[in-house]
Image (cartoon, grey):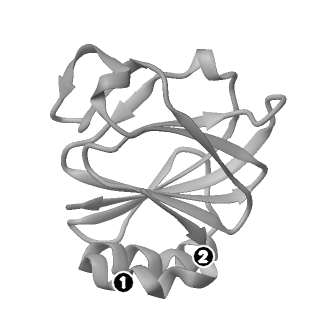
Amino acid sequence: MIIDLIENKEKYYPIHIGIMNALKNLENILKQDLTPKQRIDLDNDVYYLYNETITKNKDEMKWEVHHKYVDIHYLIEGVETIGYANNFNNVNIIGTYDENSDYALFEGNGEYITLKPSMFAIFFPHEIHKPIIALNNPEKIKKIVCKVKF
């Protein structure tokens, strides 16, 4: 997992070509007239999901993990807490991995970070995370999740 400000995005370009392309093109995506739940495809390996939603209490959300894609959570507006679990010992899977949607859901415990506007968090495949959590009280957020095939 990586947490940083978007102004420092170039530090992460060497990690993976898809991460570089996703971060480089994020500014152009933000200039578009976006609608909630909109998907914008950059190429076959990178796409963006824009959403406006209300953060929830920790117990209302499930932990998730992906096998094929990196998630880059970029916060545009509001404050969002995101959970992360360092290993699978603290969580238990609910159901099975959905290969088509590339996710599995979990219940369990972990740590939490807070994103503010212009911050991003990168979660690599198999890094368990829990997005859209309220810091104190539920509030509206605007965010983009960049999905990068890894």
Residue under the image location 60 percent in, 76 percent down: 6
Q: Name the one closer to the observer, 22 or 64.
A: 64
CA separation in Å, label 2 and label 1: 12 Å
| Quadrant of residue 60 within the rendered picture | top right
Q: Is 120 placed above or below 103 here?
A: below
Report the side of 7 relative to 69 (left or right).
right
Report the side of 50 relative to 69 (left or right).
right
| Quadrant of residue 23 within the rendered picture | bottom left
Q: Disc 2 vs disc 1: Cβ atoms closer than 8 Å? A: no
Residue identified by numbered label 1: 13
Residue 147 percent across, percent down from the top left: 35, 57
Q: Residues within 10 Å of mark 1 (few under 14, many from 20)?
A: some
**Image quadrant where one finds the N terminus:** bottom left
Residue 118 percent across, percent down from the top left: 69, 69
Residue 57 percent across, percent down from the top left: 69, 22
In the displayed orientation, state which residue is furthest to the top: 95
Residue under the image location 65 percent in, 58 percent down: 75
Say which amino acid is labelled 2: Ile
Report the side of 89 relative to 30 (left or right).
left
Residue identified by numbered label 2: 6
Say which amino acid is labelled 1: Tyr
